[in-house]
Amino acid sequence: MEKPLVDTLRSAPRPLLDEIIKESESRLSAQLSTALASDQRAMNFFGFMVAAVIVVTGASFAMIKVSYMLSAIAALAAIGLVVSAYFALQAAVPTDFEMVGNDPSSWVEDIESNISIDNALAEQASHYDEMLKNNRAAMAASAHYMRMAGWTAEVTVAIGALVAIFHWMALII
């Protein structure tokens, strides 16, 4: 069985613990910045997809008198873009994201137990390790949804364009 991280960290000298904490806090801050940028990208893509859905839906209604087939292709493309917008929105849904620091009440048990500062720092570093892993998992889930949004939009546009081109070619031949 693997030794818990906190036990290993307790054997580290104080300067090393201080550096571990500093770097962990730096990484947590970087994760937060990256996650916020990812959320912004997802919301921008969502807005773009909503605008595209409105345009394609309007085109579907406008083409109904010209060609039922082209109108249906546009309607199906609008549905695909709605799915893409849904995935983009899921990418930006708020999650439990870990941030640097802790609440003063988190120290009560340590104070009452008269824990040494070195042991407290080891526990904090171990806690930061868990926080970093949790953030990484949240960011991976968000990235998955964003990839799905992009893939769905790409496939929708490609299939819609190909079907429309083949339909148009069939009309002129």
Image: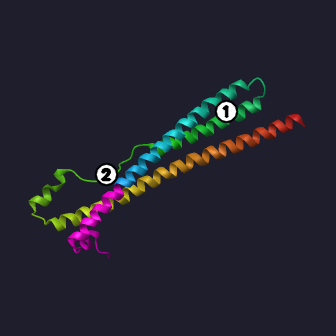
Q: At 53% across and 44% down in the image, what residue appears?
A: 87
Query: How many residues crowd mark 2 within 10 Å: few (<14), some (14–19), many (20+)?
Result: some
**How far across and how far down the image is residue 169, in percent?**
84, 38
**How far across and how far down the image is residue 161, in percent?**
73, 41
Q: CA separation, marks 2 and 1?
A: 43 Å
Query: Magenta region: which residues?
Result: 1-28
- Looking at the picture, tell me which residue is in the foreground, 7 or 13: 13
Residue at the farthest right position:
173
Q: Is residue 12 magenta?
A: yes
Residue at the farthest bottom position:
1
Instruction: Provide the residue designation for mark 1.
Output: 75
Q: Amino acid at mark 1?
A: Ala
Q: Is residue 56 magenta?
A: no
Q: Quadrant of the N terminus?
A: bottom left
Element marked by disc 1 = helix
Q: Pointers 2 and 1 in contact (CB under 8 A)?
A: no
Instruction: Provide the residue designation for mark 2.
Output: 99
**Position of 37 compared to 53: left or right?**
left
**How far across and how far down the image is residue 102, in percent?**
23, 53
Q: At 10% across and 62% down in the image, what residue appears?
A: 113
> Can residue 42 be seen?
yes
**Position of 145 compared to 70: left or right?**
left
**How far across and how far down the image is residue 135, in percent?**
38, 55
Pair 2/1: label in front: 2
Q: At 61% across and 34% down in the image, what residue appears?
A: 52
**Rendering quarter of residue 157:** top right
**Rendering quarter of residue 72:** top right
